[in-house]
Image (spheres, rainbow, N blue to C red):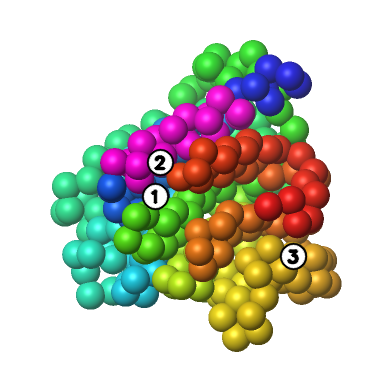
Amino acid sequence: SPETEAAYEAALAHALDTGSEILASGGAAIDAVEAVIMGLEDNPLFNAGRGAVLTETGEFSLDSSIMAGDTLNAGAVAGLSNIRHPISAARAAMENSPHVMLAGEGADQFAAEQGLEVVDPTYFFTERRWDSLIRVLERRGVEAPAHPLGAAQEDELSMLSFPDDRKFGTVGVVAMDQTGTIVAGTSTGGTTAKRWGRVGDSPVIGAGTYAANGVCGVSATGTGEYFIRLAIAYAICARIELLGETASEAADHVIHTQLTGLEGDGGVIVLGPDGTPTWSFNTEGMYRAYATSEGRREIEIYEYNEGAF
């Protein structure tokens, strides 16, 4: 609906404002990426943090990753259940642990020990995502778990009309700061009614997130199983580095030839080696936006024209 579209556009505009302010004042790309994703994780419009989708058993399992292009250092967390900001947990894993990826109870424990905010899992709950879960379980013929809050609740999304987007809404940010450092980050609740501890591409470095100075920064969204199999984020960067393709050419080839060829769906946001922004997707739309230091700014949801940058 027009109201829903306006809400997403406002959220994207706020994200651009947040990141642009940090970068314009000389701030680091990693701080901009974390701050913007934290804001998106708190916005129930998106499938990350508050507003994340639920697992088959009515729980939350949150994934995130971040990568710094100057050092190739990276951090990721999978299966978080009670940490308000998964992106901050991913950054902490990168900076304060010897590991790249932490998962499950151990990831929750590590994040709490780092002083990150712990919340009751019901913090992430929205009635919209509960309704999506019930629809999927009905199609599967699976009995629904008990409502986490006891009964249906009205919230700030109650007046908006949404598509049945049971697996999309992952958030991602890529930024270049004044030193030329590129950082990429991604955060998601995964897919509605996922089972068996399923983990998608968002916390997998090279699949859902990748960054390398002078080459690219990529964050991905879509059906993660395909992004993992194709190592999509790294594949785009490799084409830029090894074949000399532009970021737009590389992204379009990987998304429209390789991903589409496997009948996968989704898209990417990309920064090229000089910070030029681009994106590519094979779905009807993708919530996306960019802002540059020259004052260019664009917010889009639906179709795009290839080569528009």
Cα–Cα span, label 1 and label 2: 7 Å
Residue 202 visible from this viewpoint: no
The residue that appears at 28% across and 66% down in the rendered structure is 94
Which of the marked residues, 1 or 2, is nearer the chain's N terminus?
2
Quadrant of the rendered image containing residue 103: bottom left
What are the residue bounds of the magenta stretch? 8-25
Q: Position of residue 245 (x, y in %)?
A: 67, 75
Q: What's the residue type where badge 3 is placed?
A: Asp
Cα–Cα span, label 3 and label 2: 26 Å
Q: Secondary structure at mark 2?
A: helix
Which sits in the foreground, 195 or 259? 259
Return the residue at label 1.
Answer: 33
| Circle 2 Cα neighbour tier, 10 Å, few/some/many (<14 / 14–19 / ≥20) | many
Q: Is residue 47 above or below residue 76?
A: above
Return the residue at label 3.
Answer: 252
Residue 98 visible from this viewpoint: yes
